[in-house]
Amino acid sequence: MCTRHRQHGISLVELIMFIVIVSVALAGILLVMNVTTKSSADPLVHKQALAVAESLLEEIELQDFNSVAGATNPVNQANRALQYHVVRDYAGFFTTTGIYTVDGTSITGLGNYNITNVTVVSAALGNITSASNNAKLITVTVTDPQGNAMQISGYRTAY
């Protein structure tokens, strides 16, 4: 007569191996989550720099193309809201430390963002030649707190 002893449950060795395998897997998942969390603010910083650049580009594009008097009046922080400007006045727009409203008020939380360059140049656009001076390519460069430059461009035409 053969009696078989059937094993019920798991052995101590199997239990320890299970705990080790689950611990290693959990440590790997937590490591990935830690790396992801550390860099999760980057898209926010990038998006904020883009919003600053878009805001200034829109401000420039909304200006008149040519002044009636034909004179230029270069834009700086002191005269930005107080004087009449046209698109070409923003060429060489000042470099800022921090971001400011049109009236010169510093915007809280954007002190580490900087406008580093604004160019306004004649450009060819469709049937408009650059020699006709009826289209301007506006390029705005903003630097985020990490030192990365965000550059956007837009066109303004004499229509």
Image: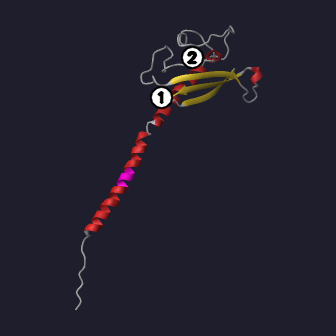
Asked if residue 135 is positioned above or below residue 89 in the image, the reply reads: below
Q: To which residue does mark 1 refer?
A: 145
For this view, does 139 lie left or right of residue 129? left
Q: Nearer the viewer, mark 1 or mark 2?
A: 1
The residue located at (56%, 13%) in the rendering is 76
Q: State whether residue 11 is above or below residue 51.
A: below
Name the residue at 26% across, 70% down: 11
Q: Is residue 142 left or right of residue 138?
A: left
Helix or strand or loop: what does disc 2 sit on? loop
- Callout 1: SS: loop
Residues packed near mark 1 inside 10 Å, few (<14), some (14 to 19) or many (20 plus): some
Towards the viewer: 121 or 124: 121
Region rendered in magenta: 25-29
Q: Hey, what amino acid is under mark 1?
A: Pro
* Magenta span main SS: helix
Image quarter where the N terminus lies is: bottom left
Q: Which image quadrant: the C terminus?
A: top right
The x and y percentages for residue 130 are 75, 24
Quadrant housing residue 36:
top left
The quarter of the displayed image where residue 18 is located: bottom left
Residue designated by label 2: 94
Is residue 27 one of those drawn in magenta? yes
- Which percent across, then down, holds residue 74? 61, 12
